[in-house]
Amino acid sequence: MSYKAPPIIRVISYLLILFALSGCAGLFSHEPFTHEPLIKKEDQEDLTLAMQVKAKLIETKELSAAAIHVEASNEVVILSGFVETESQRKLAGSIAEKVPNVKQVDNKIKVK
């Protein structure tokens, strides 16, 4: 029997790998090294916020978080994708609103 990590652990692991690899990208270019970050602080904050919202959606058993896409820009979270019912659509929006640093939620999720 093989061990399978919970979905939240896998999502966080993939994002950590992504961050680590983005830090290594400069090693393979012929450009001189600069001290400027590869990802702007604002973009990093948006990515972190989107990841936090996605993690909360994954934790919610009443939702299929795989069908919900999360983006963030300037503390505004945009939800898109599909759910089975209107109550699931509202639940996803409500969960996103409760995540710290979310100022507004644009819920574009569609009911199948």
Image (cartoon, rainbow, N blue to C red):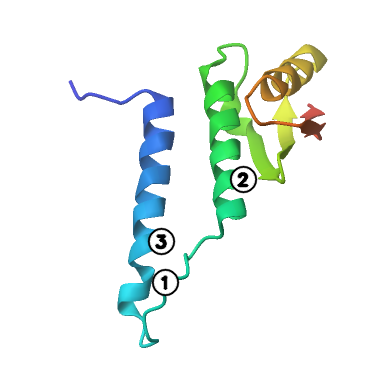
Q: Nearer the viewer, residue 59 or 62?
A: 59
Sort mark 1 into few (<14), some (14-19) or many (20+) by Cα contacts within 10 Å.
few
Q: Nearer the viewer, residue 85 or 28?
A: 28
Q: Earlier in the sequence, mark 3 or mark 2?
A: 3
- The image shows residue 43 at horizontal and vertical percentages of 60, 53
Front of the two marks 1 and 3: 1
Residue named by callout 1: 35
Q: What is the C-alpha distance between the residues marked 1 and 3?
A: 14 Å
- The image shows residue 19 at horizontal and vertical percentages of 40, 52
Mark carried by residue 90: none
Residue named by callout 3: 22
- The image shows residue 38 at horizontal and vertical percentages of 48, 65
Q: Which element carries disc 1, helix, strand or loop?
A: loop
Q: Amino acid at mark 2?
A: Asp
Q: Amino acid at mark 1?
A: His
Q: Which element carries disc 3, helix, strand or loop?
A: helix
**Residue 100 appears in which quarter of the rendering?**
top right
Q: What is the C-alpha distance between the residues marked 3 and 2?
A: 16 Å
Q: Amino acid at mark 3?
A: Ser
Vertical side of 25 occupied by 80: above or below: above
Q: Residue at x 35, y 49 (%)?
A: 17
Residue named by callout 2: 46
